[in-house]
Amino acid sequence: MNIGPRAARACAVLAAWLLTACQTIPDLSAWDRSTRDVGTAVIDGFYSTAGVNADLAARLRRVDDPALLARADRYAAASKVVSDRAEDYETLFGAMADYSASLAAIAKASANSDENVEAVAGSLNQFIGALGGTPLVGAGFELGKLLTSEIIKVRAARDFASAVQAADPIVGSVCDLLLKDLASAKAVLATKEEPIRTAISLPFEDRLKYRTLLEQRRTTLQTKVRNNSPDTSLSQVPEASEIQKVDVLLRDTDTWYVPLAKDIDQALITLSRTEQLIVQTSRAVGAWRASHASLAVAIQQKRAPESAKLAALAVRIRDLAAEIRKGN
Amino acid sequence: MPSKTEAKAWADRLDNLLQRAAAAKGADNAEQIVKVQRELRLFKEESPDFADALDRQATLAIFDLDLDSSAAAVAAIRERAEEVRKLTKLIAGVAEEAKADADVLSGRLAVQAIDAATNAIVSFRQLRQSLSTADAQEGKVAQIIDDVVSAVQTLRSQLEHS
């Protein structure tokens, strides 16, 4: 089979088009990583919120009081709902991770082959041009097969764009839903500080009252001392020795009070970090949404998608999640 | 034994706090709820020993304020569960399509491409051997074939390792 000048020109145009099509796929590895980071942050955020409720339930159950047991059940039920939501999001982000990994794989494969496609396209152009004027048999057939294999990359490029376009409204819906759920999770945490303090303190209430009385007594005595003349010797101040006794008694309470205060502090730090995680995750979801939208535009404009803000937020939420895990 | 006046004063203080708690809860004002919760805790710490029954009511109010304020949020989360599942199905569908496209470069179609490239190399080599080295025009074509074979071999290697 001979290959004429028209066919050669057509092949040359096709080869050039192949090259152009393959070069329009931006690097998606950062976006793929960000998708996983956002997914992990969302799941961590919900599990951590569920954990705060579960911890309250466990502490209330340890107090032998039917009325508190009823409240414990309600905290446990809330924890279950939020935990179930974390599982739902694990499934959702599992699918999302498959999607982003597939896009990244397509982009990577295409990026790796750009050089080869260029070399092949260039050689094919020369070869076809040279064969155009010769009576050599069979060359056109083999060239056709080679070009057919190149179509694979074009198909990947076209479907990549289609996948992103098709997924963008879905990603938008996921983000809208996430933002609503994260706002709900934030509301669940908003009034937790005092319940946490109270739940941890419940077994120590009598002792706390005793310590409060000692503190009040010391303050009263100190006020009396302060009202004396600065020239008065402490040995002449009748309250001085009682202050010393109160201080000793207060120090004695430290054996149970210091661990209790530490327990409360740690629980409140976890609460605070969980709240921060929810807030930062909400911001990351917004950035992730914008990043995916820019992905679709990036394909059209042949440039890399926006991901710097998202990457910065991802680092922050990873750190927060690690701190929460470390604290628990 | 506490005086009736003293006991009533503490009861009035708690009653006032509970009224404010109801107002904050009614307005769904988280900031006010937290403020009243804090005052209820301080009430418990400062109240005298004889006020145990009042303390208990204050304790329950702290938890009820929290549970009531978050109940709506928890219910909303529960109600949105179906939406999450629906979206999971949708994105799984898109992911499946994208995965199939990714497989193009590493799966069945890539194997076909490797086969096609291998066949092309064999054919080009046969063609190359049939060309006369004495003829200048055919020598030029032979050089182009060498370039093409080299490029196709590189392409095949990339596909095999992608």
Image (cartoon, coloured by chain):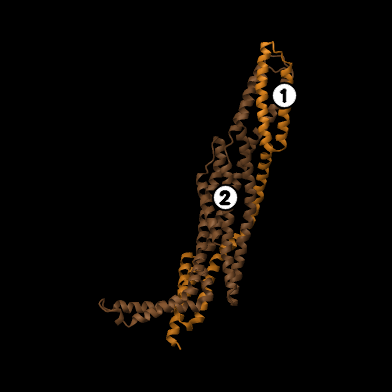
Chain colours: A brown, B orange
Q: Which residue is mark 1?
A: A142
Report the quarter where the N terminus of chain A lies. Answer: top right
Q: Which residue is mark 2?
A: A37
- Does residue A85 appear anywhere in the picture? yes
- Does residue B40 appear anywhere in the picture? no
| Three-letter code for the amino acid on which mark 2 is drawn | Asp
Q: Residue at x 28, y 79 (%)?
A: A233
Report the quarter where the C terminus of chain A lies. Answer: bottom right
- Viewer-side residue, B28 vs A237: A237
Q: For mark 2, name the chain.
A: A
Q: Residue B145: x and y, percent?
A: 68, 20
- Viewer-side residue, A26 vs A235: A235
A131 is higher (above) or lower (below) than B11: above
A124 is higher (above) or lower (below) than A33: above
| Three-letter code for the amino acid on which mark 1 is drawn | Glu
Q: Residue at x 54, y 36 (%)?
A: A303
Give SS at disc 2.
helix
Q: Residue A237: x and y, percent?
A: 31, 81
Q: For mark 1, name the chain.
A: A
- For this view, does B13 lie left or right of residue A235? right
Q: Residue B16: x and y, percent?
A: 45, 76
Q: Residue at x 63, y 60 (%)?
A: A84
- For this view, does A5 lie left or right of residue B27? right
